Amino acid sequence: DGGITQSPKYLFRKEGQNVTLSCEQNLNHDAMYWYRQDPGQGLRLIYYSQIVNDFQKGDIAEGYSVSREKKESFPLTVTSAQKNPTAFYLCASRVGAGGQQDTQYFGPGTRLTVL
Amino acid sequence: GDSVTQMEGPVTLSEEAFLTINCTYTATGYPSLFWYVQYPGEGLQLLLKATKADDKGSNKGFEATYRKETTSFHLEKGSVQVSDSAVYFCALSDSGGTSYGKLTFGQGTILTVHP
């Protein structure tokens, strides 16, 4: 089955530690995205990547880092510089740019709790 | 910049009632419009979409029409079921200028349907 997987589903970390969230897709999509969701709010874009070895900051990139070494993988690192890291993190992917192919498909999410 | 405004929730209905969730948007260019649904503890699922003015998206009994003149994309369903209880997000994608397909989300509307 084609889809997007995120692991782990729940993640607990101590304050001051870096943590990496995994996102893998087997849809052969070029573009991938990371969003953050806080209670009662919509999703906010952290980083996005349109192609392998290229990525750009979204609206709330401070305290986060990403890499895109393979087409199918787009891991997100939450660093100790992120002031409020506790949130639900969602990864998404899309076929390519524009037109009828502009639907983003989402993974199941990772809930990060910093103690 | 782009923005999406959804009616405030939560919305509580009895089974078989009529549902409307209002969504209006502000955008430059010609965005695509989406409704996503999120069940507890899960990622977002695409419910329906429309890519140009006067298009009607439909899926699982839900409908929404892209109204450029009123900049709206209201979600409707004629007869809701308990299984429709979830959070609903309206979103737009500007496939024009930047072309990286950033999704701008509303804040989400919680729907609870009672038997």
Image (cartoon, rainbow, N blue to C red):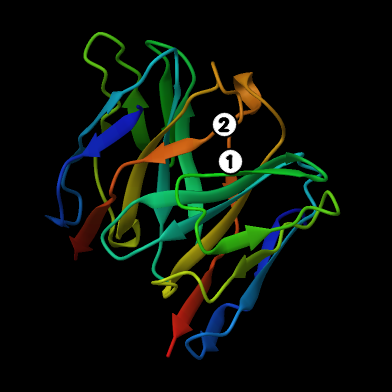
SS class, disc 2: loop
* Crowding at mark 1 (Cα within 10 Å: few <14, some 14-19, many 20+): many
Name the residue at 39% across, 11% down.
B53
SS class, disc 1: loop
Residue A104, numbered circle? 1
Q: Chain of mark 1?
A: A
Eyeballing the image, is A42 above or below A54? below
Q: In the rendering, at what x and y percent does residue B111 appear? A: 23, 56
Front residue (pair B28, A7):
B28
Eyeballing the image, is B65 above or below B5? above
Tell me which amino acid carries mark 2.
Gly
Q: Chain of mark 2?
A: B
Eyeballing the image, is B4 above or below A52? above
Q: In the rendering, at what x and y percent does residue B103 appear? A: 47, 37
Q: In the figure, residue A67 lies in which quadrant?
A: bottom right
Tell me which amino acid carries mark 1.
Gln
* Crowding at mark 2 (Cα within 10 Å: few <14, some 14-19, many 20+): many
Q: In the figure, residue B21 lies in which quadrant?
A: top left
Front residue (pair A110, B39):
A110
Name the residue at 51% across, 85% down.
A16
Eyeballing the image, is B31 above or below B5? above
- The answer to whether residue A99 is left or right of residue B41 is right
Q: In the rendering, at what x and y percent does residue B34 appear? A: 43, 34
What is the C-alpha distance between the residues marked 2 and 1? 8 Å
Labels 2, 1: front one: 2
Q: In the figure, residue B10 lies in which quadrant?
A: bottom left
Which residue is the site of mark 2? B101
Q: Are marks 2 and 1 on the same chain?
A: no
Residue B108, numbered circle? none
> Quarter of the image containing the N terminus of chain B?
top left
Contact between marks 2 and 1 (CB within 8 A): the answer is: yes
